[in-house]
Amino acid sequence: MKKAVIFDLDGTLADTIDDLANAVNRMLSRRGLPEHGTELYKLMVGEGFRNLVLRALPEGSRDGEDFESARAEAAAEYAGRCLERTAPYPGVQELLGALTTRGLPFAVLSNKPDELTKKVVRGLFPSLSFALVRGETPDFPRKPDPASALDACSRMGARPEETLYLGDSGVDMRTAKAAGFTALGALWGFRGEEELRASGADVLLSQPLDLLQYL
């Protein structure tokens, strides 16, 4: 029997890609650098905001003060506009409501900066009670290291084998497998079936409410 659920945020609970892409592209445009399409950004995200900016910049702009300035500028852009076009995927609100009704605790773990993770979750789900919402912090290494996920599991009073983990990327599947969770792959997210399977997904879900079958 499953006693807790952990969710990734970007590409799993919410479609955040337009706001992420627009924030980084505005930074690139002001610097006279080439912008990127939304589909390419779907391949850049997932390993922290710093790595997103690093991948978006041309090679000559990835070092030293120039990079730190670009990262800070993109982060500020995103912080001010992170809820402009971002929205939960269809079925997510219903899924979280069903978990609440059943009394199952659920958490969010993201590689997005912690303050931005919390801002997006509060903005999208103001009436829901999450057991934990955590982004990238100095206290834990980024996913796929399982330390933060295992801490969340413990805080929810569940053992790893009693925990479902839902995410849309290889990073998420590797996190779940390293922690001993059941790894659920979200086919509606930013990556796709091939990456999820290659990274160890136990089950692939075509829509959020499918998760309820595995509780």
Image (spheres, helix red, strand yellow):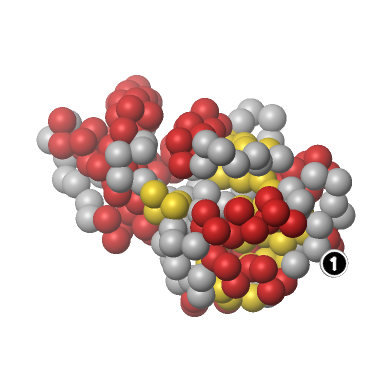
- Residue highlighted by disc 1: 1
Res 60 visible: no
Query: Residue 63, how many percent across, how many down?
Result: 36, 32
Quadrant into which the C terminus falls: bottom right
Residue drawn at (67%, 68%) of the image:
212
**Residue 202 relative to residue 204: left or right:** right
Give the vertical position of 84 relative to 199 (above or below).
above
Q: Is residue 190 left or right of residue 104?
A: left
Residue type for callout 1: Met
Determine if residue 42 is in view: yes
Left/right placement of residue 208 relative to residue 215 reads left
Neighbour tally class for label 1: few under 14, some 14-19, many 20 plus, Cα within 10 Å: few
Identify the residue at horizontal 44%, vertical 52% (top origin).
88
The image quarter containing residue 1 is bottom right
Q: Nearer the viewer, residue 176 or 144?
A: 176
- Residue in view at x 36 percent, y 46 percent: 86
